[in-house]
């Protein structure tokens, strides 16, 4: 099973990263669903037509379990791009019911929690994807760092960003977030020192 790094949605000038699941066998509708999920995530927009290929792949039948799980995850990504978080979550959880080891469903559901501003729940799902040995752990680590940073857990966020960069050495997005959190930590430290002097 191959995975593609894609972008989905934005919140507080942060970008949540998701893992799309590529179909290995299956039918042409499932492959089209995968392509639509990538396009929807990259552009941040989608249409009802994009959902149709996924619906056909699921209803057409004949998909192996792994490809059916992938199609649910991919359709969920499209629903998320359409801001239909309830349907996206339902699809991720369908994939989870088929196998508790589908790490990409946890990253993507974590992104939904992130978009809904439930950062603690997002962190739990990112941690679960890491525990399941997600193929691209740096995606979960960066997202976890953004959630921790938003919660004010700056040292945890710094650890997350640094760990993500162990996997991707030259990553301007992660470096920018690390630089920003370092500035916040420095500012917080100087402010606390100034309070102690007064």
Image (cartoon, rainbow, N blue to C red):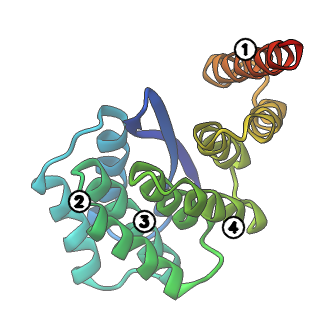
- Categorize mark 1 by other alpha carbons within 10 Å: few (<14), some (14-19), many (20+): few
The residue that appears at 75% across and 29% down in the rendered structure is 168
Q: Earlier in the sequence, mark 3 or mark 4?
A: 3
> For mark 3, what is the residue?
73
Provide the residue designation for mark 4. Answer: 128
Residue plotted at (82% across, 31% down): 162
Sequence-earlier tag: 2 or 4: 2
Image quadrant occupied by the N terminus: bottom right
- For label 2, the residue is 84
- Mark earlier in primary sequence (2, 1): 2
- Label 4 SS: helix
From the viewer's perspective, is 162 left or right of 134? right
CB atoms of marks 2 and 4 within 8 Å: no
| Foreground: disc 3 or disc 1 | 1
**What is the spatial separation of the Cα atoms under label 4 and label 1, in whole angstroms?**
29 Å
Say which quarter of the image contains residue 85. Answer: bottom left
The crowding category of the residue bearing disc 4, from other C-alpha atoms within 10 Å (few below 14, some 14 to 19, many at least 20), is many
The answer to which of marks 4 and 1 sits earlier in the sequence is: 4
As drawn, the residue found furthest toward the front would be 198
Q: Tell me the residue that label 1 is attached to.
A: 183
Which circle's residue, 3 or 1, is located before the other in the chain? 3
N-terminal label among 3 and 2: 3
């Amino acid at each position: 099973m191959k995975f593609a790094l894609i972008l989905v949605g934005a919140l507080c000038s942060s970008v949540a990263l998701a893992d799309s699941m590529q179909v290995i066998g299956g039918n042409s509708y499932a492959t089209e669903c995968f392509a639509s999920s990538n396009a929807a995530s990259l552009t941040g927009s989608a249409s009802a037509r994009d959902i149709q290929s996924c619906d056909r792949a699921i209803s057409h039948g004949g998909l192996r379990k792994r490809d059916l799980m992938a199609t649910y995850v991919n359709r969920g990504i499209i629903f998320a791009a359409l801001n239909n978080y309830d349907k996206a979550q339902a699809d991720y959880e369908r994939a989870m019911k088929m196998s508790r080891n589908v790490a990409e469903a946890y990253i993507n559901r974590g992104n939904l929690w992130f978009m809904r501003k439930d950062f603690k729940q997002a962190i739990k799902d990112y941690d679960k994807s890491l525990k399941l040995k997600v193929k691209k752990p740096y995606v979960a680590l960066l997202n976890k760092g953004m959630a921790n940073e938003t919660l004010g857990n700056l040292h945890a966020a710094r650890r997350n960003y640094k760990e993500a960069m162990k996997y991707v050495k030259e990553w301007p997005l992660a470096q920018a977030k690390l630089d920003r959190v370092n500035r916040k930590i420095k500012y917080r430290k100087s402010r606390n020192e100034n309070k102690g002097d007064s």
